Image: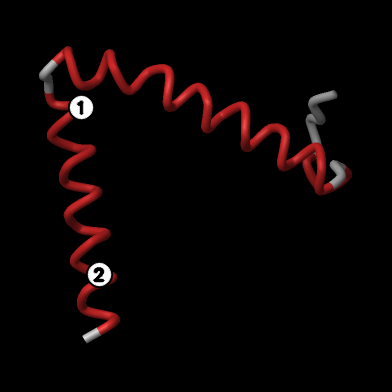
């Protein structure tokens, strides 16, 4: 059951919702990769920025 007010959702309901969203992202990934548009550029930009922050934090 999806809630309009997530403050009353149980942890399990939130986890299930997050999992469904994660699966939706994975299903759309091939489209983004084969589209070869700006979406791939932005995904790479996010990934590189994240890796840089993690590297900087660890060193």
User: In terms of secondary structure, where does tag 1 sit?
Assistant: helix
User: Where does label 2 land, which residue?
Assistant: 53
Label 1: few (<14), some or many (≥20) within 10 Å?
few
Q: Which part of the image, by quadrant, shows the C terminus?
A: bottom left
Residue 21: where, in percent of width, then height?
A: 56, 29
The circle drawn on residue 31 is none
Res 13 quadrant in image: top right
Q: Does residue 22 lie above or below 52 as drawn? A: above
Q: Earlier in the sequence, mark 1 or mark 2?
A: 1
Q: Quick one: 4 or 53, which is closer to the camera?
A: 53
Residue drawn at (79%, 30%) of the image: 4
Res 43 quadrant in image: top left
Q: Does residue 23 lie above or below 54 as drawn? A: above
User: Where does label 1 land, which residue?
Assistant: 39
Q: Is residue 39 left or right of residue 22?
A: left
Q: Is residue 26 left or right of residue 15?
A: left
Res 53 quadrant in image: bottom left
Residue 47: where, in percent of width, then height?
A: 23, 49
Residue drawn at (62%, 27%) of the image: 20
Residue 15: where, in percent of width, then height?
A: 71, 42
């Amino acid at each position: 059951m999806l809630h309009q007010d997530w403050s009353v959702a149980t942890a399990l309901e939130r986890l299930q919702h997050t999992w469904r969203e994660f699966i939706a992202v994975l299903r759309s990934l091939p489209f983004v990769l084969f589209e070869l548009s700006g979406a791939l550029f932005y995904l790479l930009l996010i990934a590189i920025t994240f890796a840089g922050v993690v590297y900087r934090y660890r060193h």
